[in-house]
Amino acid sequence: MKPDLSVEMFGLTFKNPVMGASGTVGYGIELAPYIDLGRIGAVVTKGISIEPRQGNAPPRLFETASGLLNSIGVQNIGAARFIAEVLPRLEKYDTRIIVNIYGESIQEYRQAAECFCGVEGVDALEVNLSCPNVDKGGLAFGTDPTLVQTVVREVKEASGKPIIAKLTPNVTDISPLARAARDGGADAVSLINTLMGMAVDIRSRGPFFGKVKAGLSGPAIKPVALRLVWEAARELDIPVIGVGGIMTGEDAVEFIMAGAGAVQVGTANFVDPAAMNAVVGGIETFMEENRIERLADIRGVIK
Amino acid sequence: MKATIKENRELVPRYFTMTLSEMGDDFRGEPGQFVMIRGDWGSDPLLARPLSICRFLHEDGQIRIVYRVMGRGTRRLSEMKAGQTVDINGPLGNPFPRPDESRRVLLTAGAIGAPPLIALAGSMAVSPLLIIGGRTRNDVVFISDEIRELDIETIYVTEDGSYGQKGTAVTELARHVGGNDLVYACGPNRMLAEIARLSEEIGFEAHVSFEERMACGIGVCLGCAVRHANGTYVHVCKDGPVFNVTDIDWDRL
């Protein structure tokens, strides 16, 4: 018998637990030439703000040992153009669509969320509470439990959509933030966003990035992500979506055993645009080989 | 897709030629396009490397890339042996616009910028003039086998005068180019910016190909941003790598 990879979260069925992480799949449609989008659980768009954003001045990327530092700065076409030009093309695929929203103030988060109120085809919003690459908003919001709770409450009210709060790992203790997201009415949390890092250009004796600090992703951060997902899952009764350095199906299984309801694949999409199909296949193979019928049988087995 | 390394050989110190076979029947690239290439070496280095296609050997279903060892990724690539396989994504990006061969065509290469221009020369009926500049001898002679094979009229120029003329590719271009000529170039940003300035001064049409860091090569990471003349960022992988010089904001590059 084929194992059942489906996942139920906030009243929706996802055909499997694998999602494309925000910022690594564009708006989703860019990957269509490489993978069957209908074979993944969901696409999470890159961060979308009310107004278009240009993003940061280059350089924007720096490769590290088994990882990648980025300083993109939420470059996006804005909510109106996304809804008018991109969404109709994305909706044609048989996958869940989660829109990641970004703002620089509570007001902007609320307005961005309002743009998606009643917009069919958008299944949920993920609130980017943790972008390290911008001067305002993002991380500043993500590290303050009171602000996390307020932003989550506001976007939920404004959009009427299920809300996933994307949490930052750049804190000493994730528990107060996880609880704040839940108390604000989040339907799930996703973690981790990138770990804050930096790179030095020793020839110019200066920082490599214009904003000095940048976000680290890739296999290098997987152990940290796993630990934080495990901690958040123990704390919360809402789903925890695990993200950070997942390259294979076996990596994804580790997150599920640590308590993740679903997983997001990020930097792996840069290395291989077909990576998500391989992750889905890898989970399936692991379940078959180990006679696991449902993901619930292994979810959170690590107490 | 997987491709098999048919040959991987050092041409001069740090410069390598790699011929890839079994590219698959649907591999149809054009001059100026690139591939993302990666060996099966685990997670470090993590990302594939964007490398321009130097030769399309269609009849044999092969492509050739010529690359310089710059860092960890290209070093790992240089250590691979014939018979091993690599992961290839491509052809990617926009090719050079087809040259109007009734005009004189000048190709200007800065060292390892030469390979895509060799591909372009190989596709033309009339031989263009190639100007290849570099710091020293090895930075220009690495590509001479390809130049001889395609019989391309070439001016070599080195900054230290160790081979060919003494000077830079741009000083040499300035001596030869006229307002009605068509210029194609690939090299470091500083060189491309000088060509843009010269183009404005003399009035020739110029298309340049950028060398840029990339994570994905397909427009999802948004890492390879350059400033467009209209003030927005465009991306070398998807909007380029070839741009008309008038499309770029050279002052804010």
Image (cartoon, coloured by chain):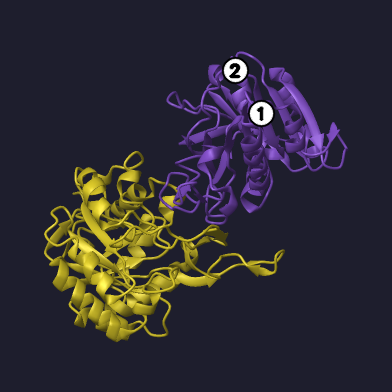
> What amino acid type should be assigned to the residue bearing mark 2?
Met
Q: Residue A214: horizontal and vertical position, in percent?
A: 50, 68
Which element type, helix, strand or loop, lies under badge 1?
A: strand
Which sits in the foreground, B114 or A241? B114
In the rendered image, the vertical position of residue A178 relative to residue A298, given as above or below: below
Taking A280 as reference, is B157 left or right? right
The N terminus of chain B - image quarter: top left
Question: What is the crowding at mark 1: few (fewer than 14 residues within 10 Å), some, or many (at least 20)?
Answer: many
Which element type, helix, strand or loop, lies under badge 2?
A: loop
Taking A147 as reference, is A96 left or right? left
Residue labelled with disc 2 = B124
Residue labelled with disc 1 = B107
- Let me know if residue B241 appears in the view: no
Would you identify the image quadrant in which residue A146 lies? bottom left
Which sits in the foreground, B71 or B104? B104
Mark 1 in CB contact with mark 2 (< 8 angstroms): no
> Marks 1/2: CA distance?
12 Å
- Let me know if residue A195 appears in the view: yes
Picture colour for chain B: purple
Output the chain of dot 2: B
> What amino acid type should be assigned to the residue bearing mark 1?
Leu
Q: Which residue is drawn at the image coordinates 53% and 39% (left, top)?
A: B246
Q: Residue B114: horizontal and vertical position, in percent?
A: 67, 33
Question: What is the crowding at mark 2: few (fewer than 14 residues within 10 Å), some, or many (at least 20)?
Answer: some
Picture colour for chain A: yellow
Taking B117 as reference, is B140 left or right? right
